[in-house]
Amino acid sequence: MAKQLQGIAASPGLAIARAVVLDAEAYVPVRGSVEQPEREVARFRDAIRQAQAEIERIRAVAEEKLGAEKAAIFEGHLLILEDPDLIETVEERIREEAVNAEYALYEASQTFIEALSQLEDESLRERAADVRDVSGRVINALRGVQGGDLSQLAEECVIVAPDLTPSDTAQLNLDVVRGFVTEIGSRTSHSAIMARSLDIPAIVGAGAGVRDIASGSVVVLDAVEGVLLVDPSPEELALYQDKKAQYDRRKAELRQWAGRASVSADGHRVEIAANIGKLEDVQKALDNGAEAIGLFRTEFLYMGRSDLPTEEEQFQSYKYVLEKMAGKPVVIRTLDIGGDKELPYMDLPKESNPFLGQRALRLCLERPDVFRTQLRALLRASRYGNLKIMFPMIAVLEELQEAKKILAEEKRQLIASGVEVADSIEVGMMIEIPSAAVSADLFAKEADFFSIGTNDLIQYTMAADRMNETVSYLYQPYHPSILRLIRHVIDAARAEGKWVGVCGEMAGDLTAIPLLLGLGLHEFSMSAGSILPARELIGSLSFGDWQSLSKQALSLRGHREVQSFVQEQLQRRVSV
Amino acid sequence: MITQSFTVTNPAGFHVRPIKTFVQAASQFPCKVSVLSKGKKVNGKSSLGLLTLGIAAQDEVTLEIDGDQEQEAMKTLGELLVRIHE
């Protein structure tokens, strides 16, 4: 049996190779005194220049290998070498105390490393690694010592180390390095982030057991489960070779779908979009091949703070997403808050039935100051991309009309005051209240598009609180009642030449997708991680077949019957 | 000496790249630039100092600027604090 270590799977994948253990010993300089402090200062400056040249070289390599974004970390390193608070402190100490440069630099860096290590923000805390990396480099230069050069590894290996510095990771030779494992670190450690962008398997935080691994021993790195096997038995080795082959094949299969259009096997085109709730999510959406943002929840702008976000703050956030999506559609939903989502500073009254209370657009129409600020920010951002505005929680036509009227007023005023606004901005609405679904034909005349929020639509149609476990059995997305409502919405929209999306969990659900496709849904909006499997599935389905199959499904008796019907059909079609 | 407060809007807080831009801009001005947040005060021309403030999105940050060209510095640096960086 192999020795087993458990760590954090920082970058998924499997690797099997011999271990290369990096030297764990950190050099701690001793305090010494110098006779000519000015000469010591000059020696320190020379070492800084040498370190600058080295970092500049690593930066160039990293830029070529990892792209400008990841190479920016080395600009941060160069900045550390110019930092007045660090460099002047060192030079002062050399001059005033006649200490050696190694020691003065070590001490000054330690102060910053300690201060950074105490920060709450994990990614700022990780910057301590940068300071350690840079000061270690200068100290090596002062000592005339060559640091380890990871670009020289010649054989396939898994790197084993206490931690990897940013310059270590940037220099990894990917032709031979199959993955790495570190003793310390977390999912947001620098090394973890680098591993994900290099797309190599990595386990971090595997603990002190890492120190017992000898260079040359065979290791199995399972960075899907976060398990490391040292010296596996032949059986274990065979098992993991199989697992690795399967994983790699599946990954390559899915990857192929990233840059493709979402088209059924018989050529019916749909759109697969991403739901996002934070600005950081946009990059993940793009990486997974999202064709649009189908739902941008704006609540994050309002939560976790003590006052309302200003128009300028909102404008900057909307502009950021629109520019990042570079002309691809971005559906931004206006504030969906109230009831259960609390904003202490808005002083919302406690309600006994928050899901049926004054939430979302109902609240916005009651608080036009809040609503108008958001609409102005959206309108101002509209010229930076393909913006579509969506109103949530509409039950009756008057609400949509009122919201559109306010939007038109703000648009007129902005234009009158000389602000540039996009000519045509689609204005749509969520369908999550059964009244809106049932009367979708009425709304379709006045909305440019619908997006069905299936989570709420199911909860309201079944009159079952999703948070209440005793009635959770009523959360039945495949129930014919739900599917019939969806069909009705799609048909009503099509009659008016409008498009329909689903932005609830159903959109990424591999059992619901064939039905939604067959019903004629135009846009599927889901979390980024679901996009590639969904696109692959759609590519294997016949739209023509599922048009008639979904009709059949709608006449079945219940949720379970529909579920087994779809799964049987999928099975049959795969085996044919 | 002049002071003014700003709310940081960059979603990722005030990290390596925005700090780099800020420090480079601050270093162009002859005046002394101090940045205050959560009861700490650091040199606005030191990236390490700024990092140790641990500024997150939506944090309030105060600039304290003293010396020649302090008005221009306040305008330039204040705009950097509320700008969103890639």
Image: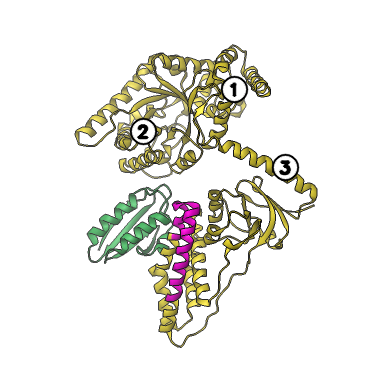
Chain colours: A yellow, B green
Please give the label number shown on residue A474: 1
**Element type at mark 1:** helix
Q: Position of residue A196 (x, y in %)?
A: 55, 49
Q: Is residue A53 magenta?
A: yes
To which chain does the residue with label 2 belong? A
Whether residue A388 is visible:
yes
Q: Earlier in the sequence, mark 2 or mark 1?
A: 2
Quarter of the image that includes the C terminus of chain A: top right
Q: Position of residue A432 (x, y in %)?
A: 46, 23
Toward which corner of the image does residue A308 lie, by quadrant? top left
Q: Nearer the viewer, mark 2 or mark 3?
A: 3
Please give the label number shown on residue A386: 2
- Dot 2 and dot 1 residues touching (CB under 8 Å): no
To which chain does the residue with label 3 belong? A
Residue wearing tag 3: A242
Q: Are marks 2 and 1 on the same chain?
A: yes
**Element type at mark 2:** strand
What residue range appears in magenta?
A45-74
Please, what is the dominant secondary structure of the magenta stretch? helix
Q: Left or right: A293 with respect to A244?
A: left
Q: Position of residue A143 (x, y in %)?
A: 53, 77
Please tell me which residue is depicted at 60% across the width and 36% down the height of the picture. Answer: A253
Q: Which amino acid is tagged 3?
A: Asp
Please tell me which residue is depicted at 55% across the width and 26% down the height of the picture. Answer: A538
Say few, some or many: other residues with alpha carbon within 10 Å of mark 2 (under 14 / 14 to 19 / 20 or more): many
Q: Nearer the viewer, mark 2 or mark 1?
A: 2
Q: Which amino acid is tagged 1?
A: Leu
Toward which corner of the image does residue B35 lie, by quadrant? bottom left
